[in-house]
Image (cartoon, rainbow, N blue to C red):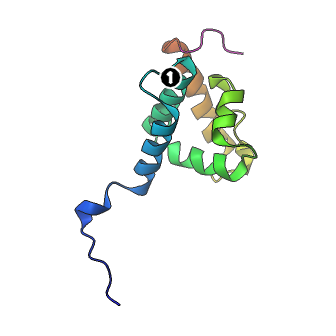
């Protein structure tokens, strides 16, 4: 049996980029409401901080409910702090603490959330 002939240009972007785009396509429509906009901003924030792949890995390994349900039941400012136990990750607690603080500052600066708890 011969191997299929697959050229590099048919393979597409890195799998991680496909995962991000799939998540954005599934969770953010053309007429995004505020919650959907927060989800989109969150993915872009994680990507900009080069940690979205780590976040998704930890989230899916530790989450009991589905991703959609998680974001529907949590406020945007809780997307990091309540997603998983930071001490049980490949990164240290300080890494996720710093990212969480930057995310909360981002939310306030973009006026996505006016009153952070």
Name the image quarter holding the N terminus.
bottom left
Q: Position of residue 18 (x, y in %)?
A: 42, 50
Q: Which residues are magenta?
A: 112-117
- State the image quarter where residue 12 is shown: bottom left
Residue drawn at 47 percent across, 37 percent down: 24
Q: In the shown orientation, is residue 19 left or right of residue 98? A: left
> Observer-nearest residue: 20 or 115?
20
**In magenta segment, residue 52:** no
Q: Is residue 66 left or right of residue 27?
A: right
From the viewer's perspective, is 116 left or right of 102? Answer: right
Image: 114 above or below 9? above
Residue 28, percent from left and from top: 48, 30
- Camera-side residue: 63 or 46? 63
Question: Where's the C terminus, which quadrant?
Answer: top right
Q: Which secondary structure, mark 1?
A: helix
Residue 15, image quadrant:
bottom left
Q: Residue at x 52, y 21 (%)?
A: 106
Check the image and report above or below for 90 versus 28: below
The residue lying toward the viewer, choosing from 62 and 9, is 9
Q: Which residue is mark 1?
A: 37
């Amino acid at each position: 049996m011969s191997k299929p002939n697959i050229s590099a240009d048919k393979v597409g972007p890195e799998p991680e980029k496909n995962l991000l785009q799939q998540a954005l396509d599934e969770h953010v429509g053309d007429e995004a409401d505020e919650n959907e906009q927060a989800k989109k901003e969150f993915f872009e924030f994680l990507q900009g901080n080069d940690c979205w792949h780590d976040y998704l890995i930890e989230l899916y390994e530790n989450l009991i409910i589905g991703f959609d349900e998680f974001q529907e039941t949590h406020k945007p400012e809780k997307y990091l702090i309540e997603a998983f136990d930071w001490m049980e990750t490949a990164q240290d607690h300080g890494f996720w603490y710093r990212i969480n603080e930057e995310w909360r500052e981002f939310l306030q600066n973009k006026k996505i959330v006016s009153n952070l708890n």
